[in-house]
Amino acid sequence: MIKVGIVGGTGYTGVELLRLLAQHPQVDVAVITSRSEAGIKVSDMYPNLRGHYDQLAFSVPDAATLGACDAVFFATPHGVAHALAGELLAAGTKVIDLSADFRLQDAEEWANWYGQPHGAPELLGEAVYGLPEVNREKIKAARLIAVPGCYPTAAQLGLLPLLEAGLADTSRLIADCKSGVSGAGRGAKVGSLFCEAGESMMAYSVKGHRHLPEISQGLRRASGGDIGLTFVPHLTPMIRGIHATLYATVADKSVDLQSLYEQRYANEPFVDVMPAGSHPETRSVRGANVCRLAIHRPQGGDLVVVLSVIDNLVKGASGQAVQNLNILFGFDERMGLAHAGMMP
Ligand SMILES: NC(=O)C1=CN([C@@H]2O[C@H](COP(=O)(O)OP(=O)(O)OC[C@H]3O[C@@H](n4cnc5c(N)ncnc54)[C@H](OP(=O)(O)O)[C@@H]3O)[C@@H](O)[C@H]2O)C=CC1
Ligand SMILES: CC(=O)N[C@@H](CCC(=O)OP(=O)(O)O)C(=O)O
């Protein structure tokens, strides 16, 4: 049994961690922080967790208490893990960061996209990008994990097989992505109001979204060369889910792309390559730590369309974080994550 802490326990990814860890046989959640709800019992705030964490209350983040844990999750806005990770690592605590603080390898690029200086560039060298389908061996030996963003998880898992095989024109890739509103977090924002987002759909950040450099970094690693990617995120009237429609030009029509994807993900417990011609739905992964993919080549042309769906709060955040924890501590990778998606 290991002891874990969660910094940022009242946000959407924090409470999703609690939901998943409630069924994890090897994890005891010892500390959960919130500055605004300190002193409140978890089960008083989240009735779905009654019977699971009845003695646990939110507390103000404190490095000494967190440093007594085996691992600490950061489910906080950018910059918080920068400030605390070094101290926790020095105390021998592993850090699993759900924010973007350690996802980009280049501190200057991070500062440009996130509009603030990087708070812990000295830790970047050891941070491991926590996409198990790419970095499983590195994760096993890591102390600091940067859990990928939600759009980057859906986009990379959908495009990696084509790029690793050197099949796609890497100068012209398109990721047309739709997210549920929980992707914006629990904080009050006009754009997240039911009257604003409840029955409407819009693209945003077309000029440049902070997930663009993260997706490009991963695709560069996969292809070994430069990436020309257009990434357009959209806000859609659903609570959870990401649907990524990915476009790539693949001139070689002789390749069996279905087999390529099936072989690439044959041993991956959380990537499901659907039968040829499928149209995965976000509700099929709702609550589940799964990415479902379908590969299409419309009219047999050179444009390949890959459909990729995840739950932004599970494979796109907290589920992937638990998957990383399992790998890090040598548990079965599926532990605590055996949830099927929710239909309807
Ligand atoms: N929502 C999603 O789908 C995804 C989110 N992420 C990332 O995960 C992280 C958390 O996201 P989400 O759960 O949506 O965020 P929320 O806004 O819903 O929650 C943020 C949490 O962090 C706490 N917090 C805020 N500021 C600080 C601070 N300075 N120090 C300590 N705690 C703080 C808040 O509690 P309090 O203020 O009371 O302390 C709250 O519990 C973000 O970095 C986000 O980008 C990643 C992938 C997907
Ligand atoms: C719908 C929505 O607003 N989504 C968020 C991205 C989700 C997320 O939290 O990503 P990070 O972990 O990288 O911050 C956005 O576009 O900013």
Image (spheres, rainbow, N blue to C red):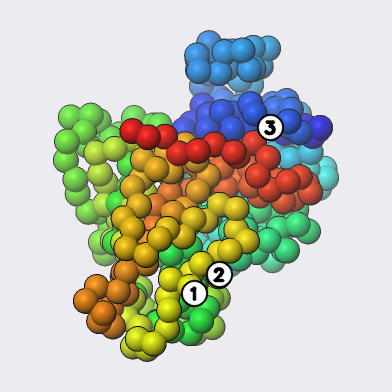
Q: Residue at left 64%, top 17%?
A: 53
Q: Which residue is mark 2?
A: 264
Q: Position of residue 256 (x, y in %)?
A: 43, 79
Residue 303 is left or right of residue 97, and the answer is left
For ligand 1, tell me if the residue under mark 2 lies within 8 Å.
no
User: What's the residue type where badge 2 is placed?
Assistant: Arg
Q: Quadrant of the C terminus?
A: top left
Residue 234 higher or lower than 275, as above or below: above
Q: Is residue 12 visible in the rendered structure shown here?
A: yes
Q: Is residue 200 above or below residue 59?
A: below
Pointers 2 and 1 in contact (CB under 8 A)? yes
Decide which of 62, 137 is in the foreground and name it.
137
List x then y, in percent, for residue 275. Answer: 40, 60
The percent coordinates of residue 290 (x first, y second) are 50, 48
Spatial CA span between label 2 and label 3: 28 Å
Element on which disc 2 rests: helix
Cβ of mark 1 under 8 Å from ligand 1: the answer is no
Q: Which mark is residue 260?
A: 1
Give 231 or 270, whichever is nearer the viewer. 270
Residue 161 in the image: above or below residue 81: below
- Regarding residue 74, the answer to whether it shows in the image is no
Counting other residues with Cα less than 10 Å from the Cα at mark 1, is it few (<14), some (14-19), or many (20 or more)?
some
Secondary structure under the numbered disc 3 in the rendered image:
loop
- Give the amino acid at mark 3: His
Q: Residue at x 37, y 35 (%)?
A: 343
Q: Secondary structure at mark 1?
A: helix
Q: Position of residue 189 (x, y in %)?
A: 30, 34
Q: How many numbered circles are shown?
A: 3
Quadrant position of the N terminus in the picture: top right
The reply, left or right, for residue 94 in relation to residue 247 is right
Among numbered discs 2 and 3, the one appearing first in the sequence: 3
Question: In the rendered image, which residue does mark 3 sit on?
Answer: 24
